[in-house]
Image (cartoon, rainbow, N blue to C red):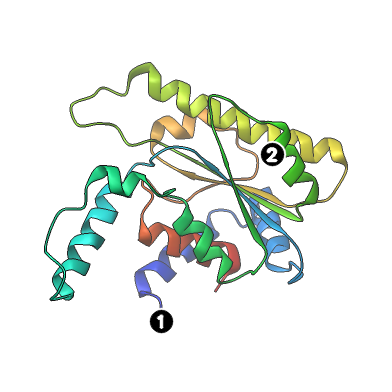
Amino acid sequence: MASPPFAKGKASSLMAEFVASSSHRSLAKLRDLDPTAILLLFTPVMVPAGYLKDQQRTSDADAQVDSKAPVSTASRAALLATDPFEMLGKALSKQHSRVRHVPYVPSVGFTDTHDHFLEKAHAVLVVSCEPTISAGASPGTGLELTLAKQAEFVGCVATELEESGRQVPMVNLSFGGDEWENQVPTYSRIWVGEKYDAESVVNVVKLVFDR
């Protein structure tokens, strides 16, 4: 199925911003990955901003199309039963068969398990994002800490790769607003949208694989 023109244009505009950056060089290497190479995807254990609203719209639309399905609101609990970033992992797997999706808990950080997967990876994507904020709640220092912990994880991955001496391309895909811009180191970083939803996943796949 052809992708929406907007998605293609969005991905192209994102690419234009990083033509001369280390992120662009890493993307170029990603696109040359051997079919047998392992693409490692690290994602935070949290509900990213934009996800619940996007899934709500999808659930309601599906219910209306299927005459046998009741038109109802998908519960928050049901949506949270699945890793939000599974959608991204599956989309990437359609372009490259050997994707390994490994979650990380920002407050726990980089562990031996992450190191084990990193040692076998030929390319790495690390996702960082702003979490969903409950209605009426103030982001406050909690948001700053969450962003800082994710930035710390990204830094650990980059350091481990550098110390290993292996030429493994790594890109940090970040979702969020101005607060995130101030928290994340500039190396290998690409901003891919203010929120995480189905449209942004399409844009990420186009950006990573240029397809």
Residue marked by disc 1: 2
Crowding at label 2, few (<14), some or many (≥20) Cα neighbours within 10 Å?
some
Q: Judge whether 133 appears above or below 103 on screen.
A: above
Nearest to the eye among marks 1 and 2: give it.
2
Label 1 with label 2: CB-CB less than 8 Å? no
Q: Residue at x 25, y 31 (%)?
A: 134
In terms of image quadrants, where is residue 142? top left
Q: Judge whether 39 appears above or below 52 on screen.
A: below
The type of residue carrying mark 2 is His
Crowding at label 1, few (<14), some or many (≥20) Cα neighbours within 10 Å?
few
Dot 1 or dot 2: first in sequence order is: 1
Q: Judge whether 84 appears above or below 47 on screen.
A: below
Instruction: Report whether 46 appears left or right of 108.
Output: left
Instruction: Report whether 201 appears left or right of 28.
Output: left
In terms of image quadrants, where is residue 116? top right
Residue marked by disc 2: 114
In terms of image quadrants, where is residue 138? top left
- Local secondary structure at mark 2: helix
The type of residue carrying mark 1 is Ala
Q: Nearer the viewer, residue 15 or 64?
A: 64
The quarter in which the C terminus is drawn is bottom right
